[in-house]
Image (cartoon, rainbow, N blue to C red):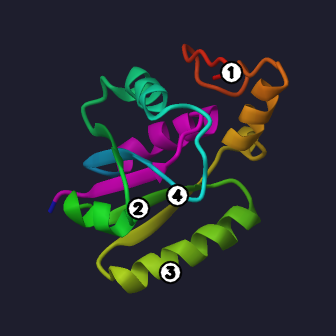
Amino acid sequence: MERIAVFPGSFDPVTKGHESIIRRSVSLFDKLIIALGENAGKQSYFTLDQRLSWLHELFGREQKIEITHYDGLTVNFCQSKRAKFILRGLRTSADFEFERGIGQMNKLMSPDIETVFLLCEPEYASLSSSIVRDILRHGGDVSLFIPEGIRLSTP
């Protein structure tokens, strides 16, 4: 059976931390689906098209990576793609507590799907899309925090 994983996120914007998790996890699975999810509780800073474009720019040539978007429950999306794994990156213990709760609920809803946690590299432990957006809002330079070749500007 093919080992398919879904890496869900808003990628608003994509950061070096996201890039690291994706590049490090590709060898763990036969296929990795980067799934840009729409969170009803959040207003996106960048458009869906911008975020998809960045992901395609970074990973579009990778044979084992598919890039798409979805609405609804992540486990339902995983089932539609025959994915048996949800990949999540962890920066801090707070991330773990939050992600553990979601992972346990997903396990109750879909017992055949496993959540896999990958620790971020130490240099990305304090990096988040929220911080990058805040720096942008205040006119700061975010080039240290986003993948090379990605250009962000305030929407």
Identify which residue, 76 or 44, lies in the foreground: 44
Query: Which residue type does callout 2 highlight?
Result: Ile
Instruction: Determine which residue is flagged by label 3.
Output: 104
Name which quarter of the figure residue 18 lies in.
top right
Above or below, 151 relative to 27: above
Report the side of 55 relative to 12 (left or right). left
Badge 1 marks a residue whose secondary structure is loop
Distance from the alpha carbon under mark 4 to that under mark 1: 22 Å
Q: Badge 4: few (under 14), some or many (20 or more) residues near its Cα, within 10 Å?
A: few
Percent across and percent down for residue 69 are 35, 44
Instruction: Determine which residue is flagged by label 2.
Output: 86
Percent across and percent down for residue 88 are 52, 57
Badge 3 marks a residue whose secondary structure is helix
Precedes in sequence: disc 2 or disc 4:
4
Query: Which residue type does callout 1 highlight?
Result: Thr
Name which quarter of the figure residue 80 lies in.
bottom left
Q: Quadrant of the N terminus?
A: bottom left
Instruction: Determine which residue is flagged by label 1.
Output: 154
Q: Is residue 11 magenta?
A: yes
Percent across and percent down for residue 115 are 44, 68
Above or below, 49 relative to 151: below
Name which quarter of the figure residue 93 lies in.
bottom right
Query: Which residue type does callout 4 highlight?
Result: Ala
